[in-house]
Image: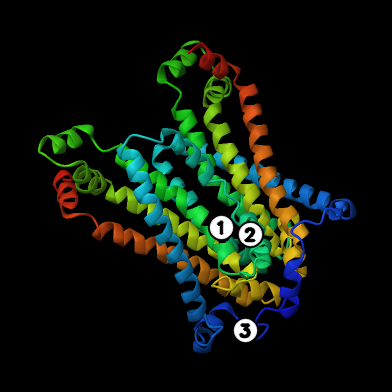
Amino acid sequence: MVFAQAPVPRDIGAFEWLADPDSWTGTNGILASLADTVVLCAIVVVVATITMVPLAAWLAHTRRGEVSVSWTVTLSRAIPTFAVAGLLVPISLRRGWGFEPWPIFIALLLLALPPIFLNTYTAIRQVDPGVVDAARATGYTETDVLFRVELALATSVILAGARVAAVTVVATEPIRAFLGGDGLGRYVRDGLGQNNDGLVIAGAILVAGLAGLTALTFRSIERFALPDGVRRLATNTTP
Amino acid sequence: MTRLFAQAQNPIVRWEYFIDEWDQIQRALIEHLQLTMYAVIIGLVVSAGLSAIALRYRWALTPINGFTAFLYTIPSVALFGILVPYFGLSRLSAVLPLAAYTLLILVTNIVAGFNSVSSEVREAAIGMGMTPARRVLHVELPLAMPYIVTGLRIAVVSTVGLVTVAAIIGQGGLGGLILDGLRRAFWTPMTIGAVLSILLALALDGLILVAGRWLTPWEQRRKTAM
């Protein structure tokens, strides 16, 4: 297979390569690959969130789908993303959809769905029934109960689910470079292919760095995106 | 690239491949099993040690959890890649990350298992004059077994999935078939590698489930009694 490979000298040091501005610019540059990866991962997490949060919220609110939880727990750790994507590549190519983005998108989506579903479902189920009854008694409609009580109180746990999904997706996305695509994993692939240790290490640092950065970003979102009432509640109860 | 798209019309599975390349499939399957076993055994030994420390010294639990959770979030491509310059394209570069990924789930479940042993049972064992080693091996370990088996199942299943990724550093296995098929635009090995790795995960999961039931017969009796 012909991959477009960045021309990198054989015995360059990882940090030397990372410090070189030329490594960052251009069509094969780090910034372009980074954007490629971030866009795909963002779409995956957004799609997973807008499908799973409403589904799980509705199931939990109506006290349905208890069985789905144990299934999701088992599945969530067991999805062989590489195999799933590998299985989808030939199908996608035969249909003329190309290497990208469908196979890797679906494989990553399967990875992102379980944590978001699980966290939303359990968080809403764990809302104090007394609080829900109180809201109903004060005249909240069912929609109000769901949106202004249950979802509001579940926010931080739902965001934690989105964080787990995002970190897992970002950490797994680099396999795309080995399945006929590009993205940030390309430098590890090219380095391995060219027997260039410096490039492999630099690529690994980039991939791991992005995963770490994703976790940090979501943690700060979790801190600032809480509904006002919930935050006041949190600050009042913690001494 | 045009050649590739012409070959995109290759059938998903060419059944003769099973007969012609049976040796290769068999070898990939064995390599896959070996890598999984090495990783899980190393992971289990290290987890047992870490859990023992965490159970003996309570303050150590948080740092140990933090460390194993940190290892778990390192992208697999990065972890396989970073070891290659030091250990080469060797089995060690594949097994170390795989073992590292099992630690989080194994330590969590081993600790939860031993914590689930009620203090009455523990005191009864001490009261009967059991030595600490005997108490741990003959009373606490069997009672913790359902948790440990659950952790082991998840660890094995996710390791089987990750071993396919180890093919990127040339460790063969079923992921090797996937990469080989991709390289030649020949979909049969790709499909076989992917399907077999999923089936292998399910088979090992079932095997450990059965072994776990056999190890803890009283759990089954309790369930049917209820």
Kindly check if marks 1 and 3 are in contact, taking CB atoms under 8 A apart as contact.
no
Q: What is the C-alpha distance between the residues marked 1 and 2?
A: 8 Å
Q: Amino acid at mark 1?
A: Ala
| Amino acid type shown at disc 2 | Leu
Q: Nearer the viewer, mark 1 or mark 2?
A: 2
**Secondary structure category for the residue under label 3:** loop
Mark 3 belongs to which subunit? A
On what subunit does the disc labeled 2 rest?
A: A
Residue A141 coordinates in the image, percent (x, y): 17, 42
Residue A207 image point, x, y percent: 52, 68
At 45% from the left edge and 16% from the top edge, which residue is drawn?
Answer: B121
Q: Quadrant of residue B24?
A: bottom right
Q: Position of residue B59 (x, y in %)?
A: 39, 41
In space, the residues marked 2 and 3 are separated at their CA atoms by 27 Å
Q: Mark 2 falls on what kind of element? A: helix
Name the N-terminal-most of marks 1 and 2. 2
Chain of the residue that carries numbered disc 1 in the rendered image: A
> Do tags 1 and 3 sit on the same chain?
yes
Residue A198 in the image: x percent, y percent? 62, 77
Figure colour scheme: rainbow
Label drawn at residue A107: 1
Q: Is residue A218 left or right of residue A6?
A: left
Tell me if B215 is positioned left or right of B174 in this view: left
Q: Which residue is mark 3?
A: A6
Residue under the image location 49 percent in, 30 percent down: B113
The C terminus of chain A sits in image quarter: top left
Determine if residue B78 is in view. Answer: no
